[in-house]
Amino acid sequence: MTRRYLRSLLLGSVFALSACAQQSEVRQLHQSVSTLNKEMTKLNQETVKITQQNALNAKSTSGVYLLPGSNTPARLNSQVGMLRMSLKNVAPNAGGTRVTLRIQGESNDPLPAFNGTVEWGQIQGTTENYQEVNVQNQLMSAPASTLAPSDVDVALQLNGITPEQLGFVRIHDIQPVTPQ
């Protein structure tokens, strides 16, 4: 009887362990599906922002629109050459929003120092019929680069707006700095 008891106990333990393993696999599968759903939601939101950014830039007669969350550069043909611009590190701070403007030159020459205008605000309506609201602007300066192709990061302080409210950033009127 002792053998039968031990065999029954061993078989019961094997079944219990296999049930636990299955539960663990199911839990892991649920976590994987949840992670995948979050990533798909993020990609869908990014796709919407890219589509909106591209539509705004297609209609723009001056400057380039950058939308937080698009994570995609936009091209601007400026007086200092063709530039690719994107927003990085959008974060709240005491005065509003802090953001890094990444500027990349597309030529084989280093970028000269230049100035430009930055506008920011909210967008209401649809991409086809939109209105810019609570628009503010400031001048920005980018230093000359020494390497080519050039990458320049410009820290911007966008006052009066939180990252959640920030609908767009528009860069325009790029002018090279003339040596004094």
Image (cartoon, rainbow, N blue to C red):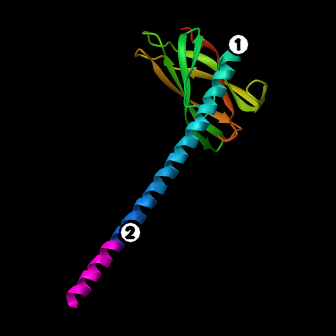
The quarter of the image holding the C terminus is top right
Disc 1 marks a residue whose amino acid type is: Thr
| As drawn, 56 above or below 160 | above
Disc 2 marks a residue whose amino acid type is: Cys
Mark 2: give few (<14), some (14-19) or many (20+) Cα within 10 Å. few
Q: Give the secondary structure at mark 2.
A: helix
Q: Residue at x 36, y 74 (%)?
A: 16
- What span is in magenta? 1-15
Residue reaching furthest bottom? 1
Q: Check disc 2 and report the residue beneath it.
A: 20
| Residue 105 highlighted magenta (yes or no) | no
- Residue 2 location (% of width, % of height): 21, 90
- Residue 146 location (% of width, % of height): 41, 16
Residue 148 occupies quadrant: top left
Please name whichever residue, 96 or 18, is drawn nearer the observer in this view of the structure. 18
Q: On the rendered structure, is 59 left or right of 76?
A: right
Residue 66 seen in render: no
- Residue 166 location (% of width, % of height): 68, 36
Q: Check disc 1 and report the residue beneath it.
A: 61
| As drawn, 47 above or below 92 | above
The quarter of the image holding the N terminus is bottom left
- Residue 91 location (% of width, % of height): 58, 41
Q: Give the secondary structure at mark 1.
A: loop
Mark 1: give few (<14), some (14-19) or many (20+) Cα within 10 Å. few
Q: Residue at x 42, y 9 (%)?
A: 108
Please name whichever residue, 60 or 118, is drawn nearer the observer in this view of the structure. 60
Give the total number of marks visible in the rendering. 2
Spatial CA span between label 1 and label 2: 63 Å
Magenta stretch: helix, strand or loop mostly: helix
Q: Earlier in the sequence, mark 1 or mark 2?
A: 2
